[in-house]
Image (cartoon, rainbow, N blue to C red):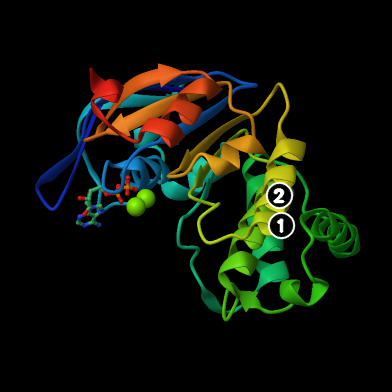
Amino acid sequence: MLHISNLHVSVDDNSILKGLNLDVKAGEVHAIMGPNGSGKSTLANVLAGNESYIVTAGEVQFKGQDLLSLAVDERACEGLFLAFQYPTEIPGVSNIQFLKTAVNSKRKYHQLDELDTIDFLQQVKAKLAQVGMDESLIYRAVNEGFSGGEKKHNEILQLLVLEPSLAILDETDSGLDIDALKVVAEGVNSFRNQERAIIVVTHYQRLLNFIQPDFVHIMMDGKLVRTGGPELALMLEEKGYGDWVTG
Ligand code: ADP
Ligand code: MG
Ligand code: MG
């Protein structure tokens, strides 16, 4: 699904990612943890195709293609999805319109017909219920005036509606209370299957009580310095990011 090798990334001439390697197969859930400033969001941004982030070395393959040569919209159409730490507000565009446009442009890319509006609305409503979101939120401008929790729920709604093959969730858990966290985790768990992969980026262990990862990676200073199973996250909770991580 995803193969990252020796990835080096700079922002404004500052080197942020310094030789990152990661392999993710279909069906797997990977968690990336690490202290603030270690480069987790930089990785998410570079995979999404944010042009402020310059790849200075290395390669990224997504489903056998050179991801870095694909345009942002092509990445999405090929099945890459990113939920950002700070979801963007889009004034003037209703949430339902946004979802419909996104789904239809993906369908067009794969030479499929546009979805019927009524069918689409039914599908979205079913998923709203699953995410525990109020229906009124789909008629409002995307994320505009949404609370922190509503924005995070909205990211999960997008995930369930768009059905990507690889979902990267950047700190989708930050700022959520325990009930909201469970709802988000249930959404992600229902998305999980053998054809899809998920990368969960998180600063805290608690989300991983609800989304059980197959692998946990620790990022420090622009590299994945340690990989293990869920027990690694528990060790981190107990010991912090000390010498044991690198040593
Ligand atoms: P994390 O998500 O692990 O907290 P980030 O990837 O957000 O870390 O940041 C890693 C480092 O890169 C930080 O030192 C941060 O200041 C820097 N950085 C990230 N994005 C930018 C940017 N757009 N402009 C300048 N510096 C940036
Ligand atoms: Mg951060
Ligand atoms: Mg971050």
The response on whether ligand 3 sits within 8 Å of label 1 is: no
Q: Position of residue 176 (x, y in %)?
A: 59, 60
Query: Which residue in the structure is indicated by mark 2?
Result: 182
Above or below, comparing residue 236 to residue 22 in the picture: below
Above or below, comparing residue 75 to residue 216 in the picture: below
Q: Position of residue 97 (x, y in %)?
A: 69, 69
Quadrant into which the C terminus falls: top left
The answer to which image quadrant residue 221 occupies is top left
Q: Position of residue 67 (x, y in %)?
A: 41, 32
Mark 1: which amino acid? Asp
Position of 52 with respect to 198 (left or right) is left
The residue under the point 39% across, 40% down is: 47
The residue under the point 64% across, 39% down is: 164
Q: Secondary structure at mark 2?
A: helix
Position of 234 with respect to 186 (left or right) is left
Is residue 61 visible to us here? yes
Q: Secondary structure at mark 1?
A: helix
Q: Position of residue 56 (x, y in %)?
A: 17, 34
Towards the viewer: 2 or 128: 128
Query: Which residue in the structure is indicated by mark 1?
Result: 179
The residue under the point 62% across, 78% down is: 141
Is residue 1 visible to us here? no
Position of 121 with respect to 197 (left or right) is right
Q: Are marks 1 and 2 in contact (CB under 8 Å)?
A: yes
The answer to which image quadrant residue 61 occupies is top left
